[in-house]
Image (cartoon, rainbow, N blue to C red):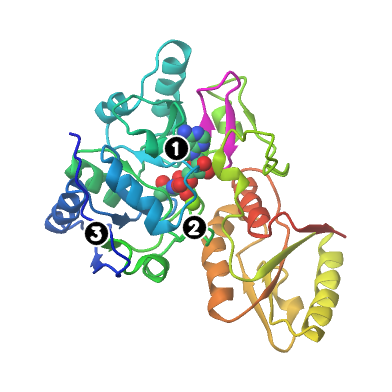
Amino acid sequence: MREQKSLRRETDKAMNTEIIKIDINNIDKEKIAHCAEVIRKGGLVCFPTETVYGLGASAFNADAVNNIFKAKGRPADNPLIVHISDYKMLELVTDCDGIQRDILDKLADEFWPGPLTLIAHRDDAVPANVSCGLDTVGIRFPSHPIAQALIEAAGVPIAAPSANLSGRPSPTRGAHVIEDMMGRVDIIIDGGNCEVGVESTVFDIAGEQMSILRPGAVTLEQISTVVESADELDWMKPHDNATEKPRSPGLKYRHYAPKATVKICDGEPSAVVSHILSEIKKAKNEGYSCGVLATDESFCYYKEDNVVVLSLGSLQDSLEQASNLFHCLRRFDDMGVNMVFAEALPKGGTGDAVMNRLYRAAGGNIFTV
Ligand code: TXA
Ligand code: MG
């Protein structure tokens, strides 16, 4: 199954990127076979998953994996997730037994296919650069039918980070991937909008303490029904301290960020609105082009000249907020906004994942009124 060659040429010239539309409800097998062939030959294929789009290559081809890092401009110490489409592939990429094996099976039973990535011991069949030299590997069995069909047809697990340029908001629509990856990959599969909208929950079962490293649609409460002692990393704690080795290398980067500066305001709803309105006045005077990330409930309070107001959806509906977040952040960029004021959102359930992404888009800039 190992392949050594890679399709990507070592040149600065832009690649020819094929855009292939595939209907999630009527998957064209010939198109999938063509994309799978490109994966097997060492090429790069962007594909939809239920969370966000991925930028994929054969997880057994170290050169192709290297090209993922180049195409994204991804730091060389931020490991990739390996996507599988059946449990035989799980055996090929992981090497674990005892309690870890038991927990892996139970969690897989309960939450796969779906938006949960498990960090377990890596089998040597997976080249070290997939995990940036760690002895663990992140594995996910996505539920999206196009992702499943692609992995199955390729016959190899697919290593894939989110298909955005490093530091940009993750792509949740075909158009977002085209914006970031045109000329950098062989194929972009446009399979419509991603349902969940935030990346998978990352749960580490390889360490002594089993912890959620990145919140997502599968919550601590749900995981705790299977693993009693599970906990969650405090993601509001800064992780870029050179003396501390972060458990999830991805945590130290300012991710999910639009080009604009983002400031979050937390507090009682009416106080938040008045604070943001007064901040807008100041920012406008300083020459900023302002935007507000609001909810359906607060949207009407920000009727100001020359301010772009976008709603994430209902304040009570964190699933809706998750599916709109990255699209809204990209729209601010499209509209030339360079200062975004965002309302803090209710935590709990998927709300934690939404606030985590917002917090990191803001580089930790949160103000309580
Ligand atoms: O929903 C998702 O997870 C999407 C889709 C495409 O599957 N993928 C995704 O990949 O978000 P990426 O590369 O953008 O984020 C992977 C996260 C990073 O924070 C990385 O540090 C962490 O998972 N990760 C991967 N392997 C790891 C490992 N062995 N140990 C600790 N953290 C790991
Ligand atoms: Mg990412």
Residues 346 and 254: in front is 254
Residue 317 belongs to magenta span:
no
**Does the rendering let one see residue 19?**
yes
**What's the distance in space between the residues labelled 3 and 2, CA to CA?**
21 Å
Label whose residue precedes the other's in the sequence (2 or 1)? 1
Closer to the eye: label 1 or 3: 3
Residues 215 and 287: in front is 287
**Quarter occupied by the C terminus:** bottom right
Give above or below for 106 relative to 296. above
Residue highlighted by disc 3: 9
**What's the distance in space between the residues labelled 1 and 3, CA to CA?**
22 Å
- Point out which mark residue 132 bears: 1
Task: Look at the numbered disc 2 and give the secondary structure of its residue.
Answer: loop
Label whose residue precedes the other's in the sequence (3 or 2)? 3
- Classify mark 1 as within 8 Å of ligand 1 or not, answering yes or no: yes
10 relative to 351 in the view: left or right:
left
Task: Look at the numbered disc 3 and give the secondary structure of its residue.
Answer: loop
Are there few (<14), some (14-19), or many (20+) residues within 10 Å of tag 2? Answer: many
- Point out which mark residue 166 bears: 2
Of all residues, the one furthest to the front in this rendering is 11
Label whose residue precedes the other's in the sequence (1 or 3)? 3
**Does the rendering let one see residue 49?**
no
- Classify mark 2 as within 8 Å of ligand 2 or not, answering yes or no: yes
Kind of residue at badge 2? Ser
126 relative to 335 in the view: left or right:
left
Kind of residue at badge 1? Cys
Tally of numbered discs: 3
